[in-house]
Amino acid sequence: MISNINNFKVLINDYIFLRKNKKILDQTLKIKNSKKGKKVFLFATGHSINILDPQKVNNIKKDGYDIFSLGGFLFSNLNFKYEIDYYLLSDERTIWPNKFDLEDDIKIPINETISQLNKRDIKLFLPVSAYNNHNFKNEIFYFNNTKSKLSSNNNDITKSNDFNASGLKALLACVHLGYDEILICGLDNNFWNNIKVNSENEILNLKSHFYEDKKYIKHKSFKLISEMLSKAAAISKSFERFENYNIINLDPNSLLNCFNKKHNLDIYK
């Protein structure tokens, strides 16, 4: 009974959001399942992305594969080795960096990502809140970035979701587009697997982006190990919601064991 009530609440809230933003979401609604019959590489910014050989991936891309990416991927030199078709930004800091007091190690990658997006013909997914309030020159598809703990959405980016990571929203966008096969790499979710605690009880973890030096830094979001592990578990659980889709994890050592890792592609270094 409670589950039905919660589902009804989500349904109503999504309906109200759609009615309010129908014109903004129109193009995103039109492209739902438009990629039936195609395949896509979804590249994120975890260190595992370095196991791939860009030239081999590009050779396969010629067979009709798309490349979808997110976050700070365009900041790295690696981005020049791939022809990216779609990109997603969901964190407010990555859209309006000047509104936040950011340290250089965060602000510089964001500004370079924005610069690269404006130089390239990449279709961009942005939250509805960015409508008429951004400086991007790309073709834009707006999505519902409303976080709802009651949502179990795993196939429609115009509806609310309960995802805590941009990688999950990018995966949701790929499912929304209707790709027959989604090949993921760089969605590591292993920030919790290399943690240390110093004599001051501060949590230290390795930098998690492939374009950063592997060194330990103080984690600013969590004070307790239980908090960090709880978030890691929640993210892993969210990925499991997609396990019935045709998703292939290209990282053979990935801790995300809810997706098939078997394939015949020649893509590694």
Image (cartoon, rainbow, N blue to C red):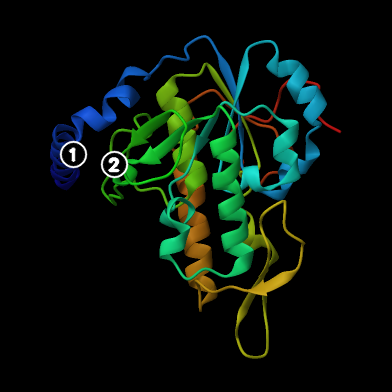
Q: In this view, does 215 lie to the left or right of 120?
A: right
Near mark 2 (Cα within 10 A), the count class, few <14, some 14-19 or many ≥20, is many
Q: Is residue 251 visible in the rendered structure shown here? A: no
Identify the residue at the far bottom of this view: 200
Q: Nearer the viewer, residue 48 or 141?
A: 141
Q: In this view, does 111 lie to the left or right of 158?
A: right
Q: Which of 49 and 83 is in front in this view?
A: 83
**Residue named by callout 1:** 17
**Residue named by callout 2:** 160
Name which residue type carries label 2.
Ser
Please state the horizontal and vertical placement of residue 139, each as a whole percent of the image: 44, 28
Pointer 1 and pointer 2: residues touching (CB < 8 Å)? Answer: yes
* SS at badge 1: helix
| Point 48% across, 46% down: residue | 166
Q: In this view, does 125 lie to the left or right of 246?
A: left
| Point 68% across, 63% down: residue | 207
Q: Quadrant of residue 125?
A: top left
Report the mark closest to the observer, 1 or 2.
1
User: What is the spatial separation of the Cα atoms under label 1 and label 2, in whole angstroms?
Assistant: 9 Å
Please state the horizontal and vertical placement of residue 65, each as a whole percent of the image: 63, 17
Quadrant of image for the N terminus: top left
| Point 63% across, 12% down: residue | 64
Q: Is residue 155 visible in the rendered structure shown here? A: yes
* SS at badge 2: loop
